[in-house]
Image (tube, grey):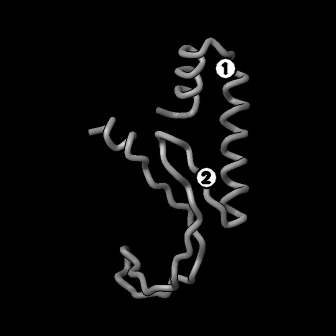
Amino acid sequence: MNKSELVAAIANETGVTKKDIELVIRSLTNTVTAELKNGGKVQIPDLGSFKAAKREARTVRNPRTGESMQSPACTVAKFTAAKALKDAVR
């Protein structure tokens, strides 16, 4: 499902216009991004939580050439699914 399909599905279920749904999704994305940039965590009940995590520098291998190279330390976004979501998918 892509963004436009998600917007259409939510609009059909809620009766809210597609334009308003797009605005809400954009706002959600911007809010989560801003919180993660500040090192915070966002929890959405029954869905899961987003958090910023530090990744240490490590040695990686270029799959094309097989050459070893160093990957610098960085901060990445991580998502952990809630138990309700895991149970629903099973």
Q: Earlier in the sequence, mark 1 or mark 2?
A: 1
The residue sitting at 55% across, 55% down in the picture is 50
The residue sitting at 66% across, 45% down in the picture is 29
Q: Residues within 10 Å of mark 1 (few under 14, many from 20)?
A: some
The answer to which quarter of the image holds residue 74 is bottom right
Left/right of residue 41 with respect to residue 49 in the rendered view: right
The answer to which quarter of the image holds residue 13 is top right
Instruction: Please provide percent x and percent y for residue 77.
Output: 56, 61
Left/right of residue 62 with respect to residue 74 in the rendered view: left
Type of the residue with mark 2: Val
Q: Residues within 10 Å of mark 2 (few under 14, many from 20)?
A: some
The answer to which quarter of the image holds residue 10 is top right
User: What is the secondary structure assignment of the residue under circle 1?
Assistant: helix
Q: CA distance from mark 1 to mark 2?
A: 25 Å
Instruction: Please provide percent x and percent y for residue 35.
Output: 70, 57
User: What is the secondary structure assignment of the residue under circle 2?
Assistant: strand
Question: To which residue does mark 2 refer?
Answer: 42
Can you say whether 74 is above or below 67 in the image? Answer: above
Instruction: Please provide percent x and percent y for residue 87.
Output: 31, 40
Instruction: Please provide percent x and percent y for residue 67.
Output: 39, 86
Type of the residue with mark 1: Lys
Q: Are marks 1 and 2 in contact (CB under 8 Å)?
A: no
Figure quadrant of the C terminus: top left
The residue sitting at 61% across, 52% down in the picture is 42
Question: To which residue does mark 1 refer?
Answer: 18
